[in-house]
Amino acid sequence: MDRMTIPIGPQHPLLKEPMSFNVTVEGERVLEATMRLGYVHRGIEKLAERRTYIQVVHLVERICGICSHVHTTTFCDAVESLLGLEVPRRAQYIRALLCELERVHSHLLWLGVLAKNVGFDTVFMYSWRDREIVLDIMEGLSGGRVSHAVNMIGGVRIDLDDEHVRGILERFDTLERQVDRALVLVEHERTLRARTQGVGVLTPEDVRRYCVVGPTARASGVDVDMRRDAPRPPYDELDVNVILHDAGDVWARTLVRTQETRESLRLCRNLLANLPEGPTAARARRRVPAGEAVARSEAPRGEVFYYVRSDGSDTPARLKVRTPTLPTLATLPGQLDGVAFADVPVVLAGVDLCIACADR
Amino acid sequence: MMIVSETLSALFSVLVFPGLAFCVICALAFEWLDRVIIARLQGRVGPPWYQPVADLIKLLAKEDILPTGASHTVGAVLPLLSLASVLTAALYVPVAGHVVSSFEGDLIVVLFLLSLPALAYFMAGWVSVGVYSVVGGSRSLLQYFSYEVPFLMALATPAILADSWRISAIVARQPTWGVFTMPLGFLLAVVGLIGKLKRDPFDIPKAASEVVAGPLTEYSGRKLALWHLTVDVQTVVGIMLLVNLFLGGDTSTFVPVAGWAAPLLFAAKALGILAALALASVLYARLRIDQLAQLGWRVLAPLALAQILVALWMVG
Amino acid sequence: MDRDAVVQALREALGDAVGEPRALPVDDLFVPLELSALREAVQLFQNELDIWHLSTITGLDDGEQIVLHYHFWHGSGLTLSVSLPYDQAEAPTLTDLIAGAGFYEREVAEMLGVAFAGLGEMAPLLLPDDWDEGPPLRHDADAEGGA
């Protein structure tokens, strides 16, 4: 059969964001795949050099739609440590609550996308319907479904009262039931397993060579989780179960993410039950003393890295962001080599791409 | 006088019931029911009753373009050919006992006519030149070879049991519904129908996440409207064929049914099969083409063969 | 292995090429290094210290030179900093040691105009194919698209 180069992207029903793959196939076998990024590059790092720190909080929230809160949290973490500012405990708990809620919403979204890519529309419909519960909770907290603008330098701008907390806990009951059902489905449903087992395998050596992070790494048995490894408060008071699997294929990643969703709901309950009293923000100076800081957090896709360099003014001298999708993208040409063409959407979905994050 | 009334009655049969008009209306109605059942099973609401009609009208109003290098003539003939063949097949499939024309061997003609769209579908992909179309087209051929053989074998079983290749005769000679005497054949026929109609989980040739829309990616406007109508009519004809061959048409085995209720019984059976198809769409992920080929040749074909052997043994 | 021990191991292997480390928030240690010792340091990390995770490579223009920070993670942050003069912004590639360094090096190359010797593919990673305005993150780059 002839060789054919099939373009996937920049516009394709499979991709939620523009990026370009050129997949050379022979019959149904992929021979090679080349990638081009940069379609959503907005120059965030350069823009940050011309904005005040307060404006940069607003800017980095827009790097990604799904993990917006963890970006601002990490940035604020870096700047607050340069300022030597102690963030009130209540604010730290609220930040972590939103981080975990974001993880739940991201993983449910991802489950739907994976299901859509394997032609399992039913699971897509159900998981996105369950995701609405999380989005409603987040909207109740911050006023926005995916973009929260909750973080300020020094703390958070929202607060919750007991009634609010009760409402959230009630909705968790429904959500946990649904996630448990999803877990049973992922573990046992045969057609889903037939499409995802043995596909897109990454060995632990691949993970280390490419410095892959997040659920993709954990599904290959590599034990990394910034919530436990670099515990910023309040994670130093929580006991995070790190979910590992050793198959390294898309099915393992599905299991890891679904179980992590369950774990995140448990952490949310913990956070809500132990919410400390106190203020929700400390006052921050506009000018940040000269220095450099590095902050790391666990975004839904893995380790997000922020480096901030300040020169004593009220604008950063350099902002460097490294999002978790970037190292995973580097493994894609290798993962796609030799797979069936029908497995290309499965592989792409399996690594949970967030191109906006990768391109910045 | 006789000739005039015979001609009128023949025209009515062909053009209205159970012919053209009935087929098209039924096709659109079944498409709506299918979409609503699937939607409800997925926790959604589903479209309003006029949605299939609205979609058709919308498509007819759209610009009809094809890429450079694609053949407009062939591209226009193929959907017409497909629609014509399924509508012709409808002539020989009894609807609650009424059939436009019937003769010994009409089952074979129907099966042949129902296979033409698959070939036309592949050609449509080939002729429209786009990469996604060609890949989708080659997959559709591969899929065709995986389901068609078990499907044909399963549909031969009622003919063997009734000792006739005429659909009306098969209906009349079923003492009990075929689904009870040859359940395996029924199951294989339903699975084969899913493959034929390219429904989930066998919608591989037009898997949106891989080949955008498969062979029909580049089609729009009138041509696409005709393709959609073809699929809808093929669904109806396929379902009614199965009702006749395996569910006893409009006859009833257990409880005697009054003459006026027979068409309702037929409709109920047809809707039952539609519901089963919708359920199958909802319950599974899409298979990969090689998994389907494995399924077809390692599971379905041997089972179909076994069913034929059992049927041959049953007639002695 | 704790950070002091790592610095000790570096000093033993590389001597004067290792500068005075400084602890930085949140939980990092920046170790200045001579460019010539970079590859050896990374090999030491991999072969003897089991430090394999490179978070990223930050390139920046501090007004006097180009600085490259190689951010490693080993239970806590560990960063190797090398400085490059403007007129000789070249560094050796690490991609044969750490495959994941490829994207980071390419980004530094296109954003700051650093040439990585031995890095095969130099196609733009994030910038458009027709970008002709020079490395955007250098201080002398055109100040377009203001606040």
Image (cartoon, rainbow, N blue to C red):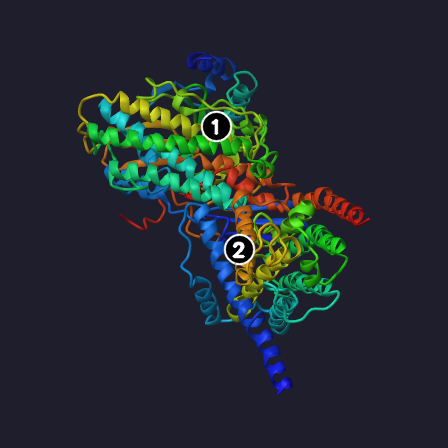
Residue at screen point 58% across, 54% down: B256
Q: Chain of mark 2?
A: B
Spatial distance from mark 2 to mark 1, Cα to Cα? 65 Å
Residue B237 seen in the current view = yes
Residue B177, percent from left and from top? 65, 51
Left or right of C94, for residue C111: left
Q: Picture quarter containing residue B171?
A: bottom right
Q: Nearer the viewer, mark 2 or mark 1?
A: 2
Q: Residues within 10 Å of mark 1 (few under 14, many from 20)?
A: many
What's the residue type where badge 2 is placed? Ala
Residue A254 seen in the current view = no
What's the residue type where badge 1 is placed? Leu
Camera-side residue: A71 or A190?
Answer: A190
The circle drawn on residue A179 is none
Q: Which residue is mark 2?
A: B268
Q: Which residue is mark 1?
A: C54
Up-down: is B259 above or below A188? below
Secondary structure at numbered mark 1: strand
Residue at screen point 65% across, 41% down: A338
**Which quadrant is home to the C terminus of chain A?**
top left
Left or right of A276, for residue B181: right
Residue B306, percent from left and from top? 76, 44
Secondary structure at numbered mark 2: helix
